Image: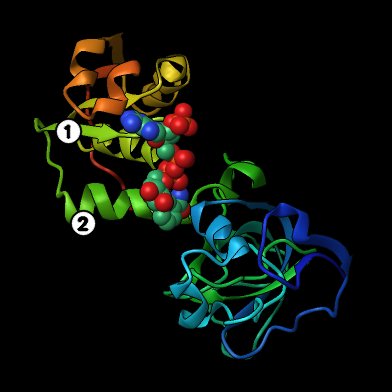
């Protein structure tokens, strides 16, 4: 199969597109025909091998141990390992190719990837493969922050710094879905994009810029706009990111 391959740490010029052996689904693994894969912050860390601690955490000390980067993907199940119980060939799925430590290459940037069943879910019919592939890592970090650590509840006031980034756009929508009053801080140029994403799943949302509030955050925020959203008709999450 064709894959993006990396033999040494460095910038994106170390990446090659070439032929490698096909992976095989073993035990509880799915062999997925990759239709879309996404880049998140950890993929960038592992490509460069920085911070150095990730090299001794399993990425490979001198060079990447696993050659094919990427962890987040969406595609069709091609075949299943003998211990797989939830999926059949042909199913459309999305998820992460690694369990726990993501500071390693996960093999997503390839035609096929062998991935753990437990890190995958059926792809919602309303999402494209590209949209689904963008969800797993950034979305689960937002879930950790908003639901697990933040325990956001209806009526609370929540401030999300970096609201227009990969994690922030999920965090804004989750906090709103939990019924919070959300203030997002990011570059003012992202106001339109954030307004669109925040309208998802809520009946009314209003945004306005308030640069004065941004300057209260950090000195580097002073050039940025603050985006405030108020929601009515808040609803609880019906179980995970697939909503
Ligand atoms: N996404 C992941 O899967 C992942 C995984 C592990 C760790 N993390 C960590 O989680 C954090 C967020 O990651 P991310 O993937 O969401 O990054 P991201 O997509 O780069 O988003 C960060 C956002 O913050 C904005 N920003 C930068 N400086 C700011 C400031 N001073 N005030 C307000 N906003 C500012 C950025 O705007 P500009 O783009 O205009 O600068 C960008 O919109 C990072 O620390 C990252 O290392 C993320």
Q: Residue furthest left?
A: 155
Q: Residue furthest right?
A: 19
Decide: few, some or many residues near mark 2? Use Cα within 10 Å; few <14, some 14-19, many ≥20.
few
Give the number of marks. Answer: 2
Residue found 65% across the figure and 72% down from its top: 88
Q: Is residue 192 above or below residue 92?
A: above
Q: Are marks 1 and 2 in contact (CB under 8 Å)?
A: no
Residue 163, x across and y down, in percent? 35, 32
Residue 13, x across and y down, in percent? 77, 54
Label 2: which secondary element: helix
Please state which of residues 188 and 169 is positioned toward the viewer in this rendering.
188
Pointer 2: what residue? 148
Question: The N terminus is located in which quarter?
Answer: bottom right
Q: Is residue 104 left or right of residue 229?
A: right
Quadrant of the rendered image containing residue 207: top left
Pointer 1: what residue? 158
Quadrant of the picture in which ligand 1 is shown? top left
Q: Is residue 112 left or right of residue 194?
A: right
Q: Is residue 237 above or below residue 149?
A: above
Q: Which mark is residue 111?
A: none
Residue 52, x across and y down, in percent? 48, 71
Residue 60, x across and y down, in percent? 59, 81
Please state which of residues 78 and 101 is positioned toward the viewer in this rendering.
101
- Separation of residues labelled 1 and 2 (CA atoms): 14 Å
Going from N to C along the chain, the mark reached first, 1 or 2, is 2
Residue found 55% across the figure and 73% down from its top: 104
Residue found 16% across the figure and 23% down from its top: 216
Q: Can residue 46 be spotted in the picture?
A: yes
Quadrant of the rendered image containing residue 173: top left
Label 1: which secondary element: strand
């Amino acid at each position: 199969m064709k894959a993006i391959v990396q033999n040494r740490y460095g910038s994106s010029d170390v990446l090659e597109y070439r032929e490698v052996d096909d992976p095989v689904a073993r035990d509880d693994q799915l062999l997925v025909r990759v239709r879309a894969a996404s880049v998140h912050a950890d993929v960038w860390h592992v490509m460069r091998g920085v911070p150095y601690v990730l090299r001794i955490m399993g990425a490979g000390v001198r060079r990447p141990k696993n050659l094919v980067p990427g962890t987040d993907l969406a595609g069709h199940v091609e075949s299943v390992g003998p211990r797989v119980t939830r999926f059949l060939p042909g199913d459309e799925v999305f998820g992460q190719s690694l369990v726990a430590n993501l500071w390693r290459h996960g093999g997503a940037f390839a035609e096929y990837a062998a991935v753990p069943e437990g890190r995958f879910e059926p792809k919602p019919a309303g999402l494209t493969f590209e949209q689904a592939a963008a969800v797993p890592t950034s979305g689960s970090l937002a879930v950790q922050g908003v639901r697990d650590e933040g325990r956001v509840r209806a009526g609370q006031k929540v401030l999300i710094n970096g609201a227009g980034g990969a994690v922030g756009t999920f965090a804004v929508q989750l906090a709103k879905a939990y019924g919070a009053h959300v203030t997002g801080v990011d570059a003012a140029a992202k106001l339109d994009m954030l307004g669109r994403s925040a309208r998802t799943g809520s009946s009314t949302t209003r945004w306005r810029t308030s640069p004065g509030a941004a300057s209260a955050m950090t000195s580097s925020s002073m050039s940025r706009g603050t985006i405030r959203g108020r929601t009515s008709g808040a609803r609880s999450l019906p179980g995970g990111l697939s909503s």
